[in-house]
Structure formats: structure tokens, C-alpha cells
Amino acid sequence: MRFCNCGAVFAFAAFCAPWASADSPKYDRDDYRNFFGICWRGSPQDNIDYARQMGYTSVFYINGMEKCKNAAGMKFYLESPEYATYTRAVDVSKKYSPEEIRKFETFAALKDASKPFPENLATGWFMPPNGITIIPDFQQKKVIDRTVDKIIERIRKIEKARPGFKFAGAAWDVPQAEGDFWTGKKGNPMSNGRQVSISHWTGSGSASKHPDVTHDYPTHELGHYEFYRKLFERCRAEINPDSKFIVEPYRVYDGWVKDIEKLAAEKGPEEAKKYMADFVCEEGSSTQFVEDERNFKSGLYKKDQVSSSTPNFFDEASVRKISGVAAANGAWTHWFGRPGATGNMPDYKTIRDVPARIKLAKALPVWENINNTPLSERKWDGQVYASPTAGMSEDAVYAVQPGTQKLFFVFNTPDGIVRVPQGYRVARIYFTDGLFREFKGSANYPIKSPMLDSFIKYENSELSPKDRTISGLGFIADLVPSKDKTDSEK
């Protein structure tokens, strides 16, 4: 059995105020990195409810989210916002009018302008059986301007529909400026084959030019960067001066930082900052996001600007490793887009279905940062994570939620032990539902002071399971200062 024995004394103010320590980060709950990023699954209301319950202050937007009763007070990111500004899919089995064809051909990146429609279109993702996606021809300044105009228009519409639901920024999956182009699959041409750049078809960095368009930028890559720059500048000038921008490459260095370094070498570091995202999430299934020193060697990014957003892990050991490494280094972990369906993670359709241990492990590095837990107090030995505000082992995971008097915990095994912060005691313990909300009964049968004595043992400042059937369930303990400010007593 392994468990975290975090006995360091800390003031209850640590739950909601910075630590008085030289190595403490300085974050508050409204930090732009405190976001819940699932937006391709679930419902708007569930995602807002879950984000609020877990203390996230920003969400990735889902259509209709502004209609949620409790959206006001939250902030939203638009994920890949350009996709909502044009007809993204072309049905190759459909007959389009000459006017429709002209719109596609003069807007989309082309692989060969001499071929008939739709064979001339450079393909993004395939949508079997007959759908292909197109990618805007960002080598045209007018395409960039049109796209940014429509994004700004959409932001204003959302904000107007729900006053108090404010724009936080934008985020991109597969953000590399060379574009998210794909070939068809060999033997099944209407399915995704492999990712390529435009040069796969044209032999250069430029898309094939339609006779009726002007290419203002020599390559698709440079045009794409100009789209980023223009959007960043206009969002900050017209919507929110503190707008932030997030990218999720597969690898932090190879999928983003390396290209920004190249841009900095060509344009100079100060000019390159105009094209830089504020935060980089890594979709890949490793700890390279924080352990690959190439990510930080140039000084363009720091460890507090990277995250693991991998959706690939269900097994407890891998989830714990990613979160332990992130927390110990002052980095982050997040959800981005979806809750699974790759690696060994099931294809969950909603955050409700994700095991409580994964939900809490994903939140733990975020909470450690927002709690401003000193880096020197965060201990990770490759198996066990321990700090004054959280702990994680093969047997249990627990963490103090920032700004509250709540200790969230999950017993992974019957041997799990959760350490109650020294100087505090447990007043109540609640079962939780699929959104990690306390189950407090109903209006007719309220549960006012549950301790769950039949299920959980509370002794000598430790919580442990009495009943092995509660392994994997999420719990929340309300904490109050103990009378003598020493070890908690039941």
C-alpha cells in the first residue's frame, strides 16, 4: 500500500489566497488557464454545471451554451472558431450550382486549380461516405478579413444573448500553420489517410491559385500565421484586451514551438510574439509537454504555459503519472475537445461517464496552481504525489478545491488513505453524482450532516474505506478548523 502523508502545517487561507513563500506561483481562480475544455461531447448545461462545480472559471463553448441558466459569470473560449464561419463540408456526390462552385473555389485552398470541382480542392478531414472538408485559403488577405469579421460577429452575438457570459479567447486543435490537410486512405479514398502539407499536391508551400484570386502571402503557412495575428489583435482591440489563445498540437515542441522558433529567427523575437499562442496543450500520451527541455530552451515559453490534455489514458497509473509530473513542475492538465475514444480511454459521450478518479486527477494540477501551493512542497517520486493541499497514489487521489472548504477524494482501492489537512477536521462527507456534485437528498428528505460512518472510517486525521464497494466513487468532505489547530478529531 502507498499513501500520501501530507502533514505540513498550512493556514486555511491557503485554500483561497497565495502562500507566503518565494517559490509560490501567483494565480487566482480567474486565471485564464483555469478552464474546462470539453466541447465536442456532452451538453451545454452539463458542461457549465460541471465547470462550476469543479471551480473552473472558463469553458470551451458549445452551441447554445449562452442559453444556460448559470452561464453568466463564466467566460468562454471558441475552439477552432474559423470552422463556424463557412460551409466546411463538401458532398462529392452532390451537384452544386455554378455560383456555389465559384464560392468554394475562390475561398478554399486548392491542390490543383486546373482540375474540375471538387477534384481541385485540397482536402482536410474526410467525412465518409461522401464528405470532404475544405480549408480556407489564408494566402488571400480578403479571406482572412472575412473570417475574422465573422468570428468577431459571432462573439458579440453570444455575449449579447447572455450578458455576463464573456469571451476569454480562442483555442485550436492541430494548430500548425502549415494546415491540417489530409490525403484519402489507400483503397478507401473517402476516409482519412495521412496528414500532409499543401506541398504534397503542389510541390511548394503555396496552394494552387485560382485565376480569379490574388495570393497576398507567398505560402499557406505565412497566410495562416497572418490569420492568427489578425484575430489576436482584433479580439484584444475590440472584444477583450486580455483575450488569451490556446493551441493543442500533438507535441509541444514538434507541433508548435519549433515553428515559432523558426518564425522568431526570420522575423525577430518581438515580431514573432504577435503570432504566439499564450498556452500550449499537448495531445500526445507522454510527459514531453514538461520534460522536453527543447520546449523552453529558447525562452519563448515557460513550464507554466504548457499542459497535458491527452485524452488517451484510462488506466490509473498513466493518469497519475501525467498529473504528478505536471503538478510537481507547476504545469497543468486539461480536458480539450473530447473525454476519450483513443488510447485505452473509452469513447465517453459526456463528462458524467468519466470515472471520478480521472476527473479529480485531471483537476489536481490546476487546483495546486490556483491554491498557490509552493513548488518546494510538491513532492513526486514517480509513484506518489504529496503536498499540503493534495495527494495521489495508486490507492487514492485527493485535493483541496481552491476558494472553498472542500476536500475532494476518491479511494481507488480498499487500501486508500486520504490525509485531512493538519489543523482541520471533517464536518460532513457527501457522496457525489456524475458531475461531482454533493448528493444532499431532496426537499422532502434533505441530508444535512452526513458522515457516511457505514462506509468511511475517520480517525487520526485520516479517511479510509470501511466498505470495499465504495472504491472508485467520488466524495466531498466539508472541512472546518479544528479547535486546537492540531490533528483533526472526529
Image (cartoon, rainbow, N blue to C red):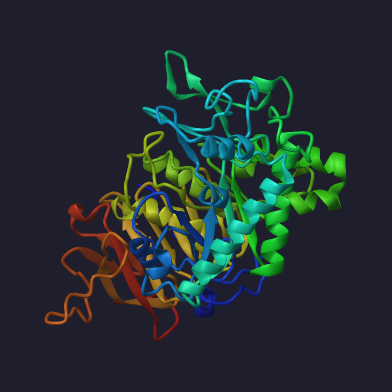
Residue sticking out furthest to the top: 187
Number of numbered discs present? 0
Q: Position of residue 405 (x, y in %)?
A: 41, 76
Q: Position of residue 203 (x, y in %)?
A: 71, 19
Q: Position of residue 71 (x, y in %)?
A: 43, 72
Residue sticking out furthest to the bottom: 483
On screen, residue 272 above or below 121: below
Q: Which quadrant of the figure contains the C terminus?
A: bottom left
Residue sticking out furthest to the front: 98
Residue 27 relative to residue 70: left or right: right
Looking at the picture, tell me which residue is in the foreground, 154 or 412.
154
Residue 428 relative to residue 261: left or right: left
* Residue located 51% across and 61% down the image: 35
* Residue located 27% across and 65% down the image: 432
On screen, residue 60 above or below 311: below
Q: Quadrant of residue 94?
A: top left
On screen, residue 44 above or below 444: above
Residue 272 relative to residue 240: left or right: right
Q: Quadrant of residue 18?
A: bottom right
* Residue located 64% across and 23% down the image: 112
Res 37 visible: yes
Looking at the picture, tell me which residue is in the foreground, 452 or 134.
134
Res 420 visible: no
Q: Position of residue 106 (x, y in %)?
A: 63, 37
